Amino acid sequence: MVNKFSQMLASILVNAIYAMVNYPIVLISTLLAPFSLLIVITFVTHGSLLPVAIGGALIMTMIGSGTSLQQDLSHLKNDFKLQDMIVSSPTTSKVYLIGMSISEIVYSLPAIIVLVILAAFYIQTTAIGYAEIFAVMVIIFIFSVSLGFLLSTITSDVIQSWAFSGIIATILSALPPVYYPITYVPFPFRYIVYLSPATYAAEIVQNVTGLVTFSSTTLLIDWIVIIAVAIIMTYIAVKKSKWTED
Amino acid sequence: MGELIVKKVSKRYSGGKFALKNVSFKVPSGGGIFALIGRNGAGKTTLVRILATQLKATSGSAKINGIDVSKNPELLRESIASVPQEARAVGWLTPKQFITSYLLWRGFDYGDANKKAIAALNNVGLSKYVNVQNQKLSGGLKRKVLVAMVMASDAKVLFLDEPTTGLDPISRTELWETLRRLKKDHFIFLTTHYLEEAERLADLIGVLDDGKLRAIGTLDELRKKAKYPYSIKILSKDHVEKPKNSIIVKGIDEHYQILTTENNAHAISNSLIKKGVKFSMSPLSLDDIFYYIVRKPIEVENYEEDGEW
Ligand SMILES: Nc1ncnc2c1ncn2[C@@H]1O[C@H](COP(=O)(O)OP(=O)(O)OP(=O)(O)O)[C@@H](O)[C@H]1O
Ligand SMILES: [Mg+2]
């Protein structure tokens, strides 16, 4: 019986822990990553949108995991031929995907810890509210890493990979109103922001903060949409990833 | 004793031409070294990647120790390991971290992996570099890390795609020593452009050309298949009239080369000695065989198109 725990540990060591140990500066950069927009939004709104922005930063950290996963895996696959070495080993694509996904969480742990502390202070809600935020994060994470993994396996060089991540970053991070309420987006554009799954996630989290409220129908749709895209994306990733080449 | 069986394997890359055309052969895979040689683009990497389950063949089948490469890849992967042609040890890791991680991916627990990593690095003479980041190592040392990596694993079938490319002559000889030790209980499938390497190291040699397997066998067997297994090198062909049952070829260096049968070789050498012409005589080297098999002699006179090779 192969030891799946060891196999996941390998991914976590290579892509997160050893990287941090060998380059401690990495810790600072991952810590700072989600804070730039959070700080801007907070200052611009004199602090009134801080809770929304914290929720937004939590979502964006999860989206960022997927984007980083895509870049890291493309790099390992195309520049080091690591994927080929792993294919010819007992590690399956699923175990590799899970290990590498966890590595992205480990990598963003410093930022997540700070954000969670901030959330505990500034987002006033019930236990159910916190549970909702947590669930949204998990769902968005699953969606995002599945997408990242899929793209990493189908790209064959860095330029192609950058092109994908540019497009994904726009759709998933720039477009959706995660750091501010969707009501700030004027109308025809509001239809456009609904193209991004992150928008639906943001509505749920913003509702939890109490600063923006949505009808229960809207929230139900939001849940259905994010759960559906996460399931569909995972399915596509499992079916369409090019673990071995045709 | 296992076997590597390749049956009518063809590979056509999407939208491309055929990189492998109906390749079939059989070699024992219990232990020993099989070297695959062939020019750039001959299809060596394509074949290695198919056998190492990284690439799907367009048609045909292959089995290693009874396990089908495409039908049962997951089982096969427990006993194989591969160092791809362009593989590099991950740059931000040290050799020890990299090999430890690889062994974890293979299913070892951390303590074991760590110990085996250090032992393997010592084994290939990299003990000084255990804790230096891979990206700071020279190109040849980086390749050595990868060989140490598969050595340390539990895999008994190793695919090494040009393992010695970029190694200095001393490191190469050292690596040969390592591979010789390994082959006692491993089957090593390697590709190389260094014919001397195949000649010295391999128990069996395969010659791939333009996607087709043109010859396979021990060096002696390949020689025997050659119509003219002896080579006589002279500086100018003015000294000899073309002997019967032989051909004269202009070699890559300034020499002319007479390829002939064993009997003729004696007669020719005697007459050259009498004339006082300097020459050297030897059985065909793998280099010679290679040139004729891939049909790219630099310039051939009286070249007989008889397809004996
Ligand atoms: N991914 C690919 N897509 C399309 N064609 C490819 C691909 N990989 C290889 N080829 C083609 O297949 C043929 C065989 O290539 P392969 O890499 O197997 O050769 P090789 O014998 O390993 O060469 P070298 O000695 O240069 O490494 C070549 O014509 C090459 O251009
Ligand atoms: Mg090659």
Image (cartoon, grey):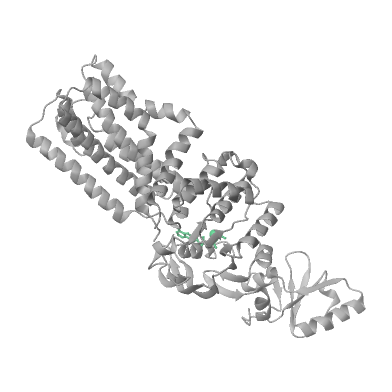
Q: Is residue A238 visible?
A: yes
Query: Looking at this view, is B152 or B48 the one in front?
Result: B152
Q: Is residue A196 visible?
A: no
Q: Residue visible at 88% across and 81% down?
A: B271
Above or below: residue A168 compared with residue B309: above
Query: Looking at this view, is A219 or A111 the one in front?
Result: A111
Give coordinates of residue B242: x percent, y percent: 79, 81
Query: Looking at this view, is A231 or B177 the one in front?
Result: B177
Ligand 2 shows up in the quarter that is bottom right
Above or below: residue A144 compared with residue B243: above
Q: Residue visible at 38% across and 25% down?
A: A32
In the picture provided, is A97 more to the left or to the right than B155?
left
In the picture provided, is A114 more to the left or to the right than B89?
left
Above or below: residue A222 compared with residue B254: above
Above or below: residue B37 compared with residue A236: below
Give coordinates of residue B270: x percent, y percent: 87, 81
The picture quadrant where one finds residue A187 is: top left
In the picture provided, is A23 more to the left or to the right than B58?
right
The picture quadrant where one finds residue B292 is: bottom right
Query: Looking at this view, is B3 or A26 the one in front?
Result: B3
The extreme front residue here reads B111
Question: Quick one: quadrant of the N terminus of chain A?
Answer: bottom left
Question: Quick one: quadrant of the C terminus of chain A?
Answer: bottom left
